[in-house]
Image: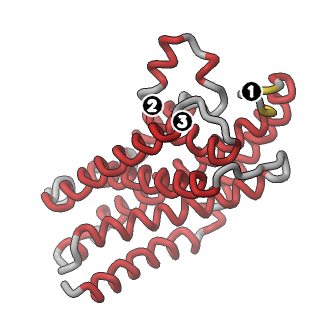
Amino acid sequence: MPYHLQWIAFKTILIKEIRRFMRIWVQTLVPPAITIALYFVIFGNLIGSRIGEMGGFDYMQFVVPGLIMMAVITNSYSNVVSSFFGAKFQNNIEELLVSPVPNYVILSGFVLGGVARGLAVGFLVTLLSLFFTTLEVHNLWVTVSVVFLTSVLFSLMGFINAIFANSFDDISIVPTFVLTPLIYLGGVFYSIDMLPTFWQGVSQLNPILYVVNAFRFGILGHSDINVTAAFIMIFVFTVLLTAICMYLLNTGKGLRE
């Protein structure tokens, strides 16, 4: 398939994905922003005023980067898993699979659609956070790159979940029993320096810990872990999940069975 036609196919999938969540923006963009705003009020203003400082920062400043990343992660994931499973459930995906469109174009279109929603919600949450605290970006390159790579990573996770899901109930299993616990145990609300040595080691097995701390470094200049190591981990996970997605698409597992 010529490259210019691949580009047209990619743009078509991406625009369709963006229009999908923008058409119902009241359901896809507003609720997560309101939910995170409630976190700002409860954990930042009410509980944070009693906690005081953490990591050398006001507690509200400390949790804001983690809450922004939580919004990016959950919305990137949910957009892809719901969209791709919906296409599979309605048998629309068969039209793409039998077309001459390369599988990497299909994957890129769906993943970047998830990235678009994740970044949109992240932007709204960031704007809301300015009503509660002051944010000064410590390192713009780190901040932007971490948000983008994280959104790609969890969009890929959503894609894998959608391929293996056999019902709409299946697309909620991973977010409920895997993603949510990892987020809450990923250093969003606390510094891992507070944990005993053993649990600090256990926490370092959580990929979200690297995401949250790398973004926190980009915003505040503070991280509980080495930022270079965090980037390496995010990159490794992204490459691994991309390879898995391409394997599943190329073999048709979960799609042609």
- Residue 54 is tagged as 1
Kind of residue indicated by mark 3: Ile
Quarter of the image with the C terminus in it: bottom left
Residue located at (59% from left, 45% from top): 215
Which residue is nearer to you in this view: 90 or 29? 29
Assess whether mark 2 and mark 1 are in contact (beta carbons under 8 angstroms).
Answer: no
Image vertical order of residue 192 relative to residue 66, above or below: above
Determine crowd level at label 3: few under 14, some 14-19, many 20+ residues with C-alpha closer than 10 A. Answer: many
Residue picked out by circle 2: 206
Sequence-wise, which precedes: disc 2 or disc 3? Answer: 3
Which residue is nearer to you in this view: 196 or 173? 196
- Element marked by disc 1: strand
Quarter of the image with the N terminus in it: bottom left
- Element marked by disc 2: loop
Residue picked out by circle 3: 183
Kind of residue indicated by mark 2: Asn
